């Protein structure tokens, strides 16, 4: 791949003076038609609805109600934003005051839209079992992407698969839509920055980048428009190319997580007010709310779980995508010095386990992985691991490495002797095998605290909160639905506030 990269380095400067080759989706005649729909949990009783349109909306609105023939409520905003090089505007409206755990019907207001539905968030402390899907490194399919491993003989057949896509992970999320209530996706969405992988795009990187984003979020809309889809950043959101562009060769609009911020900045939450009766916890939760920086770092609560999403790309010492980071992607910072880590500490410390017994975090780059040191983020481990251990995080979800992996509970690369029976250390998984143009990563060399690794086909994870003490993690083979690995973590959760 490196000779290819060398060959295309510098080509974006030619964009604009050659014929367009990008495979943009057809623009609807009605420019108010909603596309790229996406939902998120935006507060204890709130769902945000994000979507794009091919013209700016002066007043984006969503009608909703608990019956499809009676959408009596309406919420509006003035959030309709774009950036240079984008053909679309990102719109966002938040629906507040929702009854918990209830099916709502909604219609994005347009002369060309349909009625859809979602399930509103469970109240923090609701002990009803539920499942959350974890999908990371999920790329585009179709003319500008492919998801059938790195087998070059299969590669040529892909562009003919339109528009059913046969994206096995998106397909499985659709088939299993009733089996989970929300999705977490810590980073690496469209892989728009891999546009140069298709030779037809070589002379039109600027448009190819945008076309891939449009294709991907169109493909994801049937899932993300139905289920809360919680996003945080990965390296593929940073810049127009996975190359060292610190010299500024990316066009304005395709640097510094711009699309990611436009798309999710007004839909991801901050942190919730605490429902704990402990006043210290309330103060800490308020502090976390102030320090949160959605869509980069934030938290939310849902039934038995408190989920904290953090940014492994920027905003900590030696962050790989930071201005002087090892990836050379020149992103961020998005907060003041230490803001992310102060957020994380206040947020984790505020979690009352008598309300939300489970504490789960999601980030993009792992520090535990098979396949050698090239797969791990040591600065991430240094910044985050001590906090995860201190506040008794139960499960940490990562991606970045394109396969599925599970580790026994571990701290400082040492397996917790209690293993899955009430450990103090967090359990770690990598769920990066969802499928993207770069294909799967081989399992590679093992580490002693690994319990499962799989790279033969596309896969993702589900996390089922059975009760206050038992959480089951399954890895699902996307093409067949087969459960590849299943494990149950037992935690006593006997202390309301864990500090260790
Ligand atoms: C209306 O929306 C559908 C997709 O939701 C699209 O296929 C169709 O082209 C749109 N019609 C117009 C007139 O824009
Ligand atoms: C896509 O998947 C469907 C259902 O699994 C299958 O019938 C069809 O042949 C596939 N299309 C292509 C082009 O592979
Ligand atoms: C209240 O919460 C704080 C942390 O937020 C904790 O340290 C303290 O022990 C709690 N107090 C009680 C009585 O649980
Ligand atoms: C990236 O964007 C943030 C927030 O908009 C800004 O503070 C930061 O300086 C930008 N970084 C670069 C390298 O332009
Ligand atoms: C947990 O790991 C951190 C390194 O990330 C280390 O500093 C700390 O001592 C470890 N704690 C325990 C109890 O082993
Ligand atoms: C890695 O080694 C551990 C410990 O020996 C073992 O349980 C695990 O199955 C191995 N993982 C792989 C992918 O071979």
Image (tube, rainbow, N blue to C red):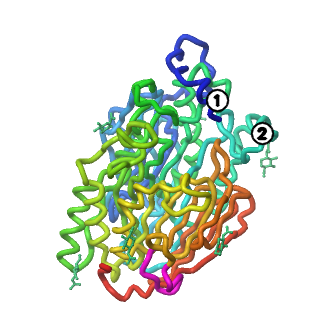
Measured as percent of width and height from the top left, residue 342 is found at 25, 60
**Residue positioned 38% across, 76% down in the render:** 392
Read off the residue under disc 2. 152
**Range shown magenta:** 416-426
Q: Choose between 261 and 71: the one closer to the eye.
A: 261
Q: Choose between 225 and 32: the one closer to the eye.
A: 225
Measured as percent of width and height from the top left, residue 142 is found at 68, 37
Read off the residue under disc 1. 3
Measured as percent of width and height from the top left, residue 454 is found at 68, 63
Q: Choose between 142 and 248: the one closer to the eye.
A: 248
Mark 1 vs 2, N-terminal side: 1
Q: Quadrant of the C terminus?
A: bottom left
Dot 1 lies on which element?
A: helix
**Residue positioned 44% across, 24% down in the render:** 249
Q: Is residue 74 visible?
A: no
**Residue positioned 33% across, 44% down in the render:** 76
423 in the magenta segment: yes
Mark 2 surroundings: few (<14), some (14-19) or many (≥20) residues within 10 A: few
206 in the magenta segment: no
The quarter holding residue 338 reads bottom left
Mark 1 surroundings: few (<14), some (14-19) or many (≥20) residues within 10 A: few
Q: Give the farthest residue toward the top.
A: 17
**Horizontal side, residue 486 vs residue 469: left or right:** right
């Amino acid at each position: 791949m490196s000779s290819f990269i060398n060959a295309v380095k510098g080509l974006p400067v030619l964009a604009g003076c050659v014929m367009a080759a990008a495979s943009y989706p057809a623009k609807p005649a009605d420019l108010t038609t909603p596309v790229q729909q996406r939902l998120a949990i935006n507060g204890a009783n709130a769902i945000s609805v994000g979507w794009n349109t091919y013209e700016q909306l002066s007043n984006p609105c969503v009608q909703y109600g608990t019956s499809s023939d009676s959408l009596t409520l309406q919420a509006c905003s003035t959030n309709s934003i774009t950036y240079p090089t984008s053909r679309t505007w990102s719109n966002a409206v938040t629906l507040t005051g929702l009854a918990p755990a209830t099916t709502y019907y909604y219609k994005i207001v347009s002369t060309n839209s349909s009625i859809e539905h979602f399930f509103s968030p469970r109240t923090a402390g609701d002990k009803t079992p539920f499942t959350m899907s974890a999908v990371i490194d999920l790329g585009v399919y179709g003319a500008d992407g492919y998801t059938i491993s790195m087998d070059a003989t299969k590669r040529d057949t892909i562009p003919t698969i339109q528009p059913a896509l046969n994206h096995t992970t998106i397909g499985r999320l659709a088939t299993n839509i009733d089996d989970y209530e929300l999705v977490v996706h810590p980073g690496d969405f469209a892989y728009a920055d891999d546009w140069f992988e298709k030779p037809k795009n070589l002379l039109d990187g600027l448009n190819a980048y945008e076309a891939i984003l449009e294709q991907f979020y169109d493909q994801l809309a049937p899932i993300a428009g139905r289920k809360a889809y919680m996003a945080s950043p990965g390296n593929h959101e940073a810049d127009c190319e996975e190359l060292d562009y610190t010299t500024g060769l990316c066009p304005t609009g395709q640097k510094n997580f711009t699309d990611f911020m436009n798309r999710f900045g007004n839909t991801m939450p901050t942190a919730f007010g605490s429902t704990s009766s402990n006043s210290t916890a309330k103060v800490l939760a308020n502090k976390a709310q102030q320090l949160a920086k959605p869509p980069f770092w934030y938290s939310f609560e849902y039934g038995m779980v408190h989920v904290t999403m953090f940014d492994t790309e920027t905003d900590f010492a030696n962050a790989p995508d930071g201005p002087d980071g090892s990836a050379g992607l020149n992103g961020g910072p998005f907060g003041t010095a230490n803001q992310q880590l102060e957020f994380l500490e206040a947020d984790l410390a505020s979690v009352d386990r008598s309300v939300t017994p489970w504490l789960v975090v999601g980030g993009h780059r792992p520090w535990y992985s098979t396949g050698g040191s090239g797969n791990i983020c040591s600065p991430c481990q240094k910044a985050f691991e001590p906090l995860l251990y201190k506040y008794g995080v139960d499960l940490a979800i990562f991606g970045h490495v394109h396969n599925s992996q599970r580790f026994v509970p571990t701290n400082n690369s040492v397996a917790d002797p209690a293993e899955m029976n009430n450990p103090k250390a967090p359990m770690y998984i990598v769920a990066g095998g969802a499928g993207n143009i770069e294909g799967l990563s081989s399992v590679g060399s093992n580490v002693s605290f690994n319990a499962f690794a799989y790279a033969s086909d596309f896969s993702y994870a589900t996390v089922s909160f059975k009760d206050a003490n038992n959480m089951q993690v399954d890895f699902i083979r996307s093409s067949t639905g087969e459960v590849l690995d299943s494990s149950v973590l037992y935690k006593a959760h006997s202390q309301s506030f864990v500090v260790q």
